[in-house]
Amino acid sequence: MKPSPKKLPSPFVRTPEEKGKRPVEVWMIEDNHAFRQTVARLLNQTQDIRCTQSFPACEDALALLQTGATMDVILLDVELSGMNGIEGLRKIKALRPAVRVVMLTVFEDHERVFRAICAGASGYLLKASPFDRIVESVHQVVAGGSPMSPRVATSVLEMFTRMAGPKTDFGLTEREREVLELMKEGLTKKEIAARLTLSFHTVDDYLRNIYAKLHVHSQAGAVAKAMRHDLF
């Protein structure tokens, strides 16, 4: 299914201060040529995003990564010819731990969603999502969020409720638990800072502490592990 272009809502119109910023660089790994070309073209028509590379296979992207190439966000399909997207995700995160990877796929079953989050995915969208939702997700993940299609988010909640493990607090402080609760609500770092009347950098420090204590590398991973261990 090809995403249809839509007029972007006001949050995607940059302020004069933002216009001097470097565009968000996106790579796309997708073996459906028509879908890949369409999304890449539409991303490049967005004011502050550039799809600088698109690949039909994970192997091609990994080869370029090994040369030192960089990007901000990767949109990654799950089922690909050759190496599948989840295995590719693990290898990408091994080479670039800080890169944000959003799965963009037709699959929404529990197993694939769970494996993707455990492998380090920062978000999980369905290909049927409107194009402006894909753009919004790129911005959201760069800001530290974890975009998910509504049906996938519901699936994640149900899945981890069923898989809830033994209760443990992992040594989280009361403030870290407050931050974690707001992460579960899908708030960005900036929104968490505003809600708790903290500076952006203080919230960033709290997030680093939470990730270290939970032994995860993303907001989605932190929320998933917290749900498994009944921290909410």
Image: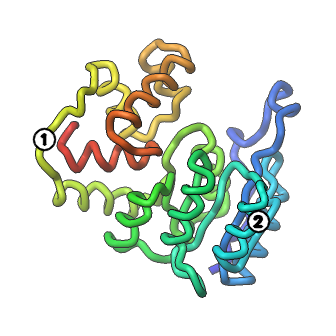
Mark yes or no: residue 66 visible.
Answer: yes
- Write the residue at 72% across / 42% down: 12
Judging by the rendered image, the residue that carries numbered circle 2 is: 64
Q: Position of residue 231 (x, y in %)?
A: 21, 37
Total numbered circles? 2
- Write the residue at 66% across / 62% down: 131
Alpha carbon separation for disc pair 2 and 1: 42 Å
Question: Element type at marker 2?
Answer: helix
> Looking at the picture, which amino acid does disc 2 mark?
Leu
Question: Element type at marker 1?
Answer: loop
Quarter placement of the N terminus: bottom right
Mark yes or no: residue 128 visible.
Answer: no
Quarter placement of the C terminus: top left
**Residue most extreme to the bottom:** 81
Q: Please report whichever mark, 2 or 1, sits nearer to the chain's N-terminal start.
A: 2
Q: Is residue 189 left or right of residue 15?
A: left
Displayed quadrant of residue 103: bottom right
**Label 2 with label 1: CB-CB less than 8 Å:** no
- Write the residue at 16% across / 37% down: 168
Q: 93 and 31: which one is in front?
A: 93
The dot on residue 229 is none
Indicate whether 59 appears above or below 73: below
Q: Position of residue 189 (x, y in %)?
A: 52, 30
Quick one: label 1, few (<14), some, or many (20+) residues within 10 Å? few
Q: Is residue 118 left or right of residue 160?
A: right
> Looking at the picture, which amino acid does disc 1 mark?
Lys
Judging by the rendered image, the residue that carries numbered circle 1 is: 167
- Write the residue at 37% across / 32% down: 210
Indicate whether 101 appears above or below 188: below
Q: 190 and 225: which one is in front?
A: 225
Displayed quadrant of residue 101: bottom right
Q: Is residue 138 left or right of residue 71?
A: left
